[in-house]
Amino acid sequence: MNLSKIVQARKTWLLGMLAGALALSAQVLAFEVLPQQIPTPPENPSTSAKVTLGRKLYFDPRLSANGTVSCNSCHNVMAAGEDGRPQSVGINGQKGGRSSPTVWNAAFLSVQFWDGRANTLEDQAKGPLTNPIEMGMPSHDAVVKRIKQIPGYVKEFEQAFGGKDAVTIDHLAQAIAAYERTLVTRNSPVDRYVAGDKKALNAQQVRGMELVKTVGCVACHSGPNYAGPALPLGTGFYQKFPMFADATLEAKYAFSKDLGRFEVTKQVGDKNMFRVPTWRNVALTAPYFHNGAVKTLDEAVRVMAKTQLNRTLKDTEVADIVAFLNGLTGEFPKQEMPRLPAYANQQIVSD
């Protein structure tokens, strides 16, 4: 072999090594672990007193008009952070118009609700309280009045926020949000794999991991929460759904009936736009989509491929992607039902 061939062979080998390194780097960058620092508004730094108070408020049905619905009713932290229903059930058995999204890892979303109408967890916590279908209180003032009737709560608000007259709707929302920011599931098999443990995923899950890149799923489900890139609070990451019209799927699931973010902004370009949901723990949060119309993850993968990417996946591809998505189930911190402050000797909730 002459010198020029040796040089060319060496160059080819180096380029191959470089391409392999770049490919590995791209694979790692496509999948991220959750950051240790949780996005938090500067006006609501977390404290143990806020978290303790927020946990009690989260589980307390007395925040609803008839004392039957708590935050946990629709976002069950003893399970996957939602209620497993197509539409959540509020006071008097009323059903809402959308499927409740999981509260687990919601702290890493830059906006809340399917339509992004709340910029922060604090904003989100205020909404259901006075929604006539959800918790049904006549006003935020009525919520504050009820809480002030419970001596134990008054004391805890003063401890958490300082001073007299500490029971306000803003402080209530801040306490609930502080608790919700503790609801983080880390160390999923995918996280361990990305961190270097190549035994954390099986061969099928690795194939699925590669497929969600090559098929195009990670164009939306990117970032550490697999719900789009990490953005400043209040900056939503949205996607039109469905992107490609499919008469058969529309007739079956009626995805387009809900106009999504348009209901908030009234801008034509926002019709059928929704905040991209997280993939974390997605195997546990059936039924799927904003209207909860799809019962299985297998079918949800097929629907997404068809409506968002205009692709029909093979059965083996669907199975591999479902296996990968199961690998995003994280470790759930233990939750304990709190003892709620008592209201003694008389009724506090109206019939």
Image (cartoon, grey):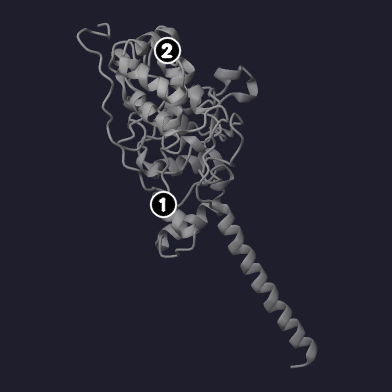
Residue 55 percent location from the top left of the image: 36, 29
Residue 160 percent location from the top left of the image: 43, 25
The label shown at residue 188 is 1
* Residue furthest right in the image: 4
The label shown at residue 139 is none
Tell me the SS state at disc 2: helix
Tell me the SS state at disc 1: loop
Q: Is residue 316 visible?
A: no
Look at mark 2 in the image and give the residue it sits on: 130
* Residue furthest bottom in the image: 1
Rendered view: 278 above or below 17: above
Q: In which quarter of the image is the C terminus?
A: top left
| Residue 291 falls left or right of residue 7 | left
Q: At x 54% / y 32%, what residue is drawn?
A: 275
Dot 2 or dot 1: first in sequence order is 2
Which amino acid lies under the numbered mark 2 shown in the image of this protein?
Answer: Thr
Dot 2 crowding, Cα within 10 Å, few <14, some 14–19, many 20+: some
Q: Nearer the viewer, residue 233 or 141?
A: 141
User: Do tag 2 and tag 1 residues touch (Cβ < 8 Å)?
Assistant: no
Q: At x 37% / y 30%, what residue is drawn?
A: 52
